[in-house]
Image (cartoon, rainbow, N blue to C red):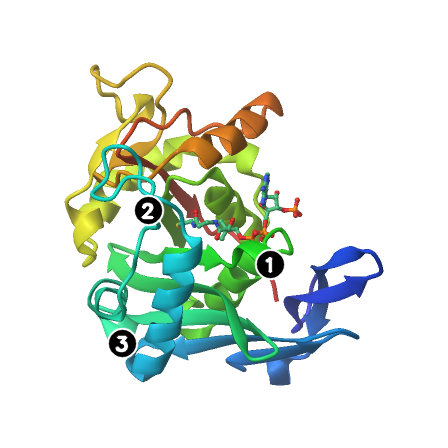
Amino acid sequence: MNGPYTRIDYMQSQRCHAPKIFTLFLEPRYRHSNSLLIMTSETVITFKVTPGKLVTDRQLDLCAHLFSENYGIWGANGPHPKEHIKMSPAKLRSEDLSNPERSALVTCSTDGKLVGHAFASTWEYGSDVIAWISQLVVHKDYRRRRIGTFMIGQLTRYPLFENITVLGLVSCNPIACDVLAKSIHVGIGNIDTKFIADNAFAFLVSSHIPYLKGAKLHGSIFGKKDAAEGVVSTVDTNFAVDHTETDAVLKTYLSQGKWCLGRLPENHEFLIMLPITARCG
Ligand SMILES: CC(C)(COP(=O)(O)OP(=O)(O)OC[C@H]1O[C@@H](n2cnc3c(N)ncnc32)[C@H](O)[C@@H]1OP(=O)(O)O)[C@@H](O)C(=O)NCCC(=O)NCCS
C-alpha cells in the first residue's frame, strides 16, 4: 500500500475457529506505539515491544517459564534426554540482551497471561544493519494463530529496527523460518540462498552474540566439499534438541515443494537470512 499508512496485522475471532491475525493499515500517529491492544469478542490480546534496557527481571522470569514449558525437549545426545529444555532469566539477560541498547523483547499476552515472546538484537556490518531473532516461542495452546508472525512483524517495525537491511535466525524448527519469512511477506519456498551463501560468514563473525560468532556453517551453499548430503544451509550450534516433531513438519514442507534449506543433521540448526528490500508503510 502506498502513502503514510503502516501495515498491521490483527486478530479476529471466527466462530468455531481459533482467532487468527488479519491485516489492517494504521494511521501514522499510531506508528511508533510500542504496544498494541486487540479486543475480540472473547479475549484481549496485547502485543508489546520493550527496549532491552527497560526489560525487567519479572518479564524475564515469565519468559523463562514460558520457554521452559513450551520450547521443546532434549534429544538423545542432550544433557537431559526427553526432558523439557529449560531456560533461566539470567541466561536470557546475558545472551539475548547482551547489548541492551541494541536489543528488544516482544511479548504477546492474552487476558494478562504471557503466551508468546521473542528477542531481537541488531548490529552493523559495512552498510548492512542486521536484526537477529532469538528465543521465539508461542505457548502450545496458542499456536497457528499467527502470533509468532505478528510478534516478529511488531519487532521489525519498532524504531530501533526500522533501518534494518537483513533479518536472520537460526532454528531447528522449519516453522520458525517460515514465520520469519512471512513476517516480511516472503514465501518460505522462495528464499534467496545465494544471499545467505554470500553473506553468512561475514555477518555471523561480526555479531556480538556468542553462539553466532563461533557457529560453524554447514551446507552445500557454502561450497564445503564435506557437506553431508542434502544439507543446504545450517550451522553447527551443538544444540541437541529432539527433532521428532520438527522432522515431521519438515516432511510436510518438503512434500509441498516449499523448502530450500535442505535437511537438518543432529546438533545443527537451519540458518535463514533475508534481505529486506521493501518495508510496508
Ligand atoms: C515456531 C513458533 C513460534 C510459531 O508460532 P505460531 O504463532 O504458531 O506461528 P504462526 O501462527 O505465526 O505461523 C505462521 C506460518 O507458519 C506455518 N505453520 C505454523 N505452524 C505450522 C504447523 N504446525 N505445520 C505447518 N506449518 C505451520 C504456516 O505457514 C503459518 O501460516 P498460516 O497459518 O497462514 O498457514 C511455535 O510453533 C513454537 O513456539 N514452536 C516451538 C519453539 C520453537 O521451535 N521456536 C523456534 C526457535 S527459534
Residue 235 drawn above or below residue 154? above
Q: Residue at x 35, y 31 (%)?
A: 233
Query: Considering the numbered disc 1 on the image, is that residue within a helix, a strand or a loop?
Result: helix
Indicate the position of residue 44 as horizontal and vertical percent values. 67, 77
Helix, strand or loop at label 2? It is: loop
Q: CA distance from mark 1 to mark 3?
A: 31 Å
Task: Quickly name the residue at label 1.
Answer: 142
Which of pointers 2 and 3 lies earlier in the amino acid sequence?
Answer: 2
- Foreground residue, 237 or 162? 237
Distance from mark 1 CB to nearest ligand 1 atom below 8 Å? yes
Q: Nearer the viewer, residue 246 or 195?
A: 246
- Residues at marks 2 and 3 touching, judged by CB atoms closer than 8 Å: no
**Mark 2 residue's CB less than 8 Å from ligand 1:** no
In this rendering, would 53 be left or right of 274?
A: left
Residue plotted at (54% across, 82% down): 33
| x and y percentages locating residue 59 in the rendered image | 37, 78
Q: Tell which of 130 and 277 is nearer to you.
A: 130
- Marked residue nearer the N-terminal end (1 or 3): 3
| In the rendered image, the vertical position of residue 279 relative to residue 61, given as above or below | above
Q: Which mark is residue 101?
A: 3
Three-letter amino acid code at the position of disc 2: Glu
Label 1–label 3 contact, CB within 8 A = no
| Residue at 69 percent of width and 64 percent of height | 2
Q: Is residue 147 above or below residue 256?
A: below
Q: Nearer the viewer, mark 2 or mark 3?
A: 2
Indicate the position of residue 41 as horizontal and vertical percent values. 79, 75
What residue is disc 2 on? Answer: 83
